[in-house]
Every structure is written in C-alpha cells, then in structure tokens.
Amino acid sequence: MLALMLPPLVAALVLVGIHGYLGVHIIARGVIFVDLALAQVAALGYTVAVLIGLSPESLLAYFVGVAATLVGALVLSFTRIEHEFITQEALIGVVYVTASAATILFAAQAPRGSEHVEHLLTGTLLWVTWPEILKIGVVYVAIGVVHWMLRHRFMTISLRPREAEAQGWSVPWWDFLFYGLFGVVVTSSVAVAGVLVVFSFLVIPALIAFMFASEPGRLLGLAWTSGTLATLAGLYLSYVFDQPTGPLVVCAFAAALLIAFLVRGLLGNRREAL
C-alpha cells in the first residue's frame, strides 16, 4: 500500500498546502468560483496544446496552459464592478461556461478527446510520479516566497479592499499579480489532480476555516488541518474500496464540510444555551 499511495499522498498534501492558503484569499474576496473558472481556462489551454500536436505532459503544453490562465487572470483583474445587480461572480461564471464550451469543442477535434476531457476533470492523482511532484513543488515554493514577501498587500486587498484603495494602491494591477500567480498554481495543479479536485482543495478547507476563525493565522491552520485530514481519508478509502481516487477525494472533502457544519451548529446551540 505504501509504495502505491505514497506519491499521491505527498502530491495531495503539497496541493493542500498551497491551495489552503490561496483559498483563504478567494473566500475573503467573495469570488468562490474563480478557481473553477481559471482551472477550466487552464484545461482549455491544455486542450489547444493537444489539438496542435503537443503531448499533455510536455513543457510546451504547460506553457500554453499558463498563457491561457494569464489571459483569464487579466480579464478577472479588471472586472471588479460596483453595480447593484452585476457582480464579479457572474462574470466569473461566464468565463467558466465559455472555457468549458470551448474545451468541449476543441476536444471533439482531437484524437481521444473524451478521454482527455475526463483526465482534465478528475486528474490522474493516483499515478503521479516523483518528478511531477518535484516540478510542482518547485513552482509552489517560488510562488509561496513571492506571496510571503507581499503578504501584507495581498492580505489587505483580500480582507480590507477599501483600505487598500484609500492608501492609493493600484488594486487592479495587484489583482492581476495575484490572479496571475494563482493561475500558474492552478495550471500546475490541474495537470496532476484535475479541475474537480483542485476546486475542492481550494474552496472547502477555506470554507471550514472561516466557520471557526477570522484571524489569518488561525484561518490557515484550520484550512491546512481540515484539508490534510480529508485528503488522508479520501486516499485511504480509495485504496480500501478500489475506487477512482479523484472523485473519492472530492467526496471526502464534501463530507468534511458537512461535519464542520454540524460541529458549527452544535457549538452555536451550546453558546445559546449558556
């Protein structure tokens, strides 16, 4: 079991580390589906790469995916609209739907297109290799260093955007830097884990964290803890019941969210009783 499951376990924990942190920013910004949208844009980039004859595992295909997500990041960075009915989340939905439709159209023209789409959705986490883990680890460490150096600006813009504007910061361009780095992470993650797993890693641990904390340190600690426990449960059940790893990991994250809701409800009732 250890020989088979150790690489996907390490890869999943690496993904939990970077996505748990980024998820706190995404939840705070109120753009829940930006990960899904950029992940689908990355999938579109990979599909175009396959259509023009590149191997999905090649470095050139990776750069095509990154380029596609940077275009998506540029669009999202300059679409913060102050309107009573039009929200950025609605525009993110448009990006996601358009990228999904384009991916299906391009995949239909490529050999074994349906298999390619399934791979992009669910990933091949079970068959990840150590060189792939090393590659994404290097990328994530580099991006983590940038985020650490700019943590004050990024956290302020995510948690207190009005304060950032009052200080005269160019929020759209800082958003582009954030979403651009975010897009590189998503592109790397989709190649390993697929769109659905990446979305779960990003959103669900952060949602759980925000149920019980508001300070950045505690938020990160809870996101990483809940994400790690859900990952361990999903991979273990996948091995024991011989089920597809990606979908079962997503279900394990959903179960963790349900448990968090129940615990939050019990804690709330206890406080009211006191």
Image: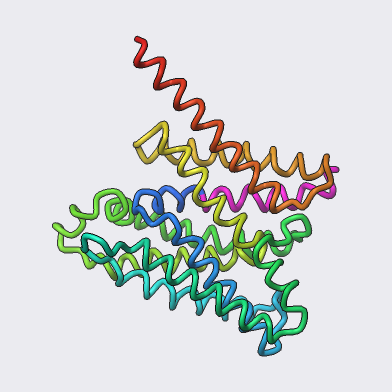
Judged from this view, the residue extending furthest toward the front is: 85
The majority secondary structure of the magenta stretch comes to helix
What residue do we see at 50% from left, 78% from top?
68
From this view, report whether residue 79 is shown above or below residue 52. Answer: above
Q: Is 260 situated left or right of 235 in this image?
A: left
From this view, report whether residue 193 is shown above or below residue 47. Answer: above
From this view, report whether residue 261 is shown above or below residue 18. Answer: above
Q: In the picture, which quadrant includes the N terminus? A: top right
From this view, report whether residue 24 is shown above or below residue 193. Answer: above
Q: Is residue 191 magenta?
A: no
Give the image location of residue 258, x and y in percent: 55, 35
Stretch of the chain drawn in magenta: 1-19
Q: Is 144 situated left or right of 254 in this image?
A: left
What residue do we see at 59% from left, 53% from top?
15
Q: In the picture, which quadrant includes the C terminus? A: top left
Q: Is residue 7 magenta?
A: yes
Residue 172 visible within the image: yes
Q: Is 214 situated left or right of 85 in this image?
A: right
